[in-house]
Image (cartoon, coloured by chain):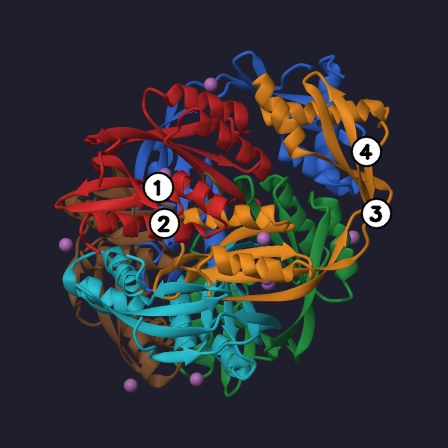
Chain colours: A cyan, B orange, C red, D brown, E blue, F green
């Protein structure tokens, strides 16, 4: 539906997955570190609960990034987490080609991310565009998401 | 004990580990995806709880498979999960040579998987063969498992 | 849309939450126990990862049930898990009044669960009815779910 | 050290713990729900990974609140999560009497929360006051926290 | 088999379940706290991974204890964790009557815990007695456990 | 502060990360296996909760080690866990150069690990040296840690 805002033609590429196990930092401190990593442009940064020696409930920090940003991300981990060491490996990555579109709902305009997979479209409602409308209209996020998908399907002649 | 049903001589080989982080799909949907992945012949497919940006409680989907099945498994992930990208790497794998045997218990016949590790046998009771007997006899799975191990040890002259 | 198949007028009531910590049973055994608990009519049975003394990675088993079924559920836990003790408490529960409806999609008929919350309807696609169609048509569960919600909205004059 | 900004004399009281199991909502949706619950004044709202029937990786939502806010929090859960039912119980609570104080560091002023427990003081650095300084000065959160604790100890004559 | 070392006739009773959410303490610190709680006689103390506000990966500490020990356990939580508040509730508990027995294996003597449930015996190998033998003989814990269960079954005339 | 006990100049190197998924071993057994792995010199061994097929709540065992110890660690996993196969990959690792120092507190001497990161020192209180003092003086681990950091800062002229 509509003109696409932006087209991204993805191909297979490589990413770097960085791991650090942290048992001597607080959850508060880790939440702060995630903010720094995401702000610096990590594709993703997330925490996995792990159980370490001496009955320590801990978290593994993982950062997904590019080779180009590896050094900066390692620096951020050294600065903002308590770890003295990080490990990483490169991984292959396949991503779907995608474009963005806007649909109009009774709540306002919502952005969709549309992937192309074989003969199908794969549709995702962009969170930020929907969340702001749910907030403003005092409805649930799902109300906005469903309205957006419905609008998309109507434009496609499905409804 | 008994004639082995089937012998498998394993050697070191390589597997592929595929990861996708999913924060925009329901648990229901992920359970359905696991069924599709296992049915298609993944060695293993499992979920790890992870904590992502914007306070999102999420799951990492991991698939363990062969290089030959990589493309098919990536297709299934693209179709049955909401992810727009997956990453993977090859890993070395060592597996024990193993054979299968059948022992007779008061509940019926149970299949054992017997690994050879150095000078030892490593015995596992095959779940499906034990679960059906536990169901039929209204006993616990452990009752059947213990009876099977006991039968194995008796045939070996240990009991 | 359509005649409701069945109406359920819920009110606040009480349920029982039963807990058992298990560090001496396998995941296989716990999966088997869940089958027994659900088959026996538990509202819900689920596992929570917990980290116990002596570096033991364990699981807490929780069963949600009625007072009437408490004894039977405790019996099942004693039989099918390795625990020597269970603890439980009653909790208040509020549930939405709900009814079921059927909508027709290009994949076949799908069941919806429709809750009444204040002036709103809360719609859920019944998993089993959608999963069987996704299987049969080789599409994703989400394709079926979205088609069902669209059909519902069209009947309601929203699309 | 310094004049306390605000004194809170706590006594034993009661809170309400509300639980809902969610296997049919996305992590995105749950993150949004947490925002709504915290904004509405929940003492705490958090997610616990759980494993439910049919291989569903799910999350339990827990809300800690007062009896006075129970109805409002249940409403928010019914609106912003996909659950059709919530359960809750009252629990006793003991909290430490606490006061707040401000210390001056090389990064700026930091707020401390000071609990009284028997003959001891229990000191916590308030996250928000420290995070804003760490951001502004491009240092780690721990640098600010340590400076604040050091400033506190010096005023107390410990350093 | 053999004379029981000690008989415990259990009946339904009450326990107290104490919860504290901790996002400002390290895993190291929590591991230390668990030692203190278990040493002081808690029935159990364990950690559950939870995800809290502001992207904080945290842990819930749970202590299972008696009413008589509630005050002491709360004191320990206030001293050894960073929490400023704990909540608790009483729960009913059912435990199996149990006795202890010793069996002789090729590795040495192993203690069994034998529960009585309806017409069945429920057997558990005591961890500490088995672990010391596995250590001494350089075999796996399972080797010792299986030998102990086999010895038990032989004495009972099952093997 | 003081003479450093030992200096370690680290450089980028490689480690091996070994994974095994375990759904047929108890938490007790896994705790025992961790002891064996750590005693044998693994850099780290830890457990991650995972959810596997057939509703099995399971754990992934991860071992971080050197190439030189890979074979021995695989042997230990084959002996002390129930797995029939393990997978591994090498990863790059960056660690901070570090040295150790001792500071004197009112509780006794505490060891600090001091990393060098760019122009900064990164300070960690060695757990074992602090825990023994906390035990002996009946104070919290944090009391000892804070006293140690304060002593360090005083010697550095910061306090
Ligand atoms: Ni930067
Ligand atoms: Ni991995
Ligand atoms: Ni296929
Ligand atoms: Ni509970
Ligand atoms: Ni029954
Ligand atoms: Ni609870
Ligand atoms: Ni409101
Ligand atoms: Ni400033
Ligand atoms: Ni004491
Ligand atoms: Ni011996
Ligand atoms: Ni990894
Ligand atoms: Ni060895």
**Tag 2's secondary structure?**
helix
> What is the C-alpha distance between the residues marked 4 and 1?
45 Å
Neighbor class of circle 1 (other Cα within 10 Å; few <14, some 14-19, many 20+) is many
Asked whether D31 or A32 is in front, the reply is: D31
In the visual, does C95 lie left or right of E110? left
Tag 4 residue: B5
**Residue C46 got which mark?**
none
Depth check, mark 1 against mark 3: the one in front is 1
Tag 2 residue: C145
> What is the C-alpha distance between the residues marked 4 and 2?
45 Å
> What is the C-alpha distance between the residues marked 3 and 2?
45 Å
> What is the C-alpha distance between the residues marked 1 and 3?
48 Å
**Residue B9 got which mark?**
3
Q: Are marks 4 and 3 in contact (CB under 8 Å)?
A: no
Q: Is mark 1 within 8 Å of ligand 3?
A: no
**Residue C110 got which mark?**
1
Depth check, mark 3 against mark 2: the one in front is 2
Q: Are marks 4 and 2 in contact (CB under 8 Å)?
A: no
**Tag 3's secondary structure?**
loop
Asked whether D62 or E92 is in front, the reply is: D62
Same chain shared by disc 1 and disc 3: no
Q: Is mark 2 within 8 Å of ligand 3?
A: no
In the visual, does D117 lie left or right of B100? left
């Amino acid at each position: 539906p509509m003109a696409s805002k932006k087209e991204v033609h993805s191909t297979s590429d490589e990413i770097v997955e960085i791991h650090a196990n942290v048992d001597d930092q607080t959850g508060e401190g880790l939440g702060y570190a995630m903010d720094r990593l995401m702000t610096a442009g990590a594709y993703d940064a997330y925490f996995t609960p792990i159980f370490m020696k001496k009955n320590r409930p801990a978290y593994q920090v993982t950062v997904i990034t590019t080779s180009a940003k590896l050094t900066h991300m390692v620096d951020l981990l050294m600065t903002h987490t308590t770890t003295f060491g990080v490990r990483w490996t490169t991984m292959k990555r396949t991503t779907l080609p995608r474009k963005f579109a806007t649909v109009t709902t009774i709540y306002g305009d919502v952005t969709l991310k549309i992937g192309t997979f074989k003969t199908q479209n794969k549709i995702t409602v962009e969170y930020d565009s929907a969340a702001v409308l749910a907030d403003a209209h005092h409805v649930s996020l799902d109300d906005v998401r469903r309205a957006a998908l419905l609008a998309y399907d109507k434009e496609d002649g499905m409804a």
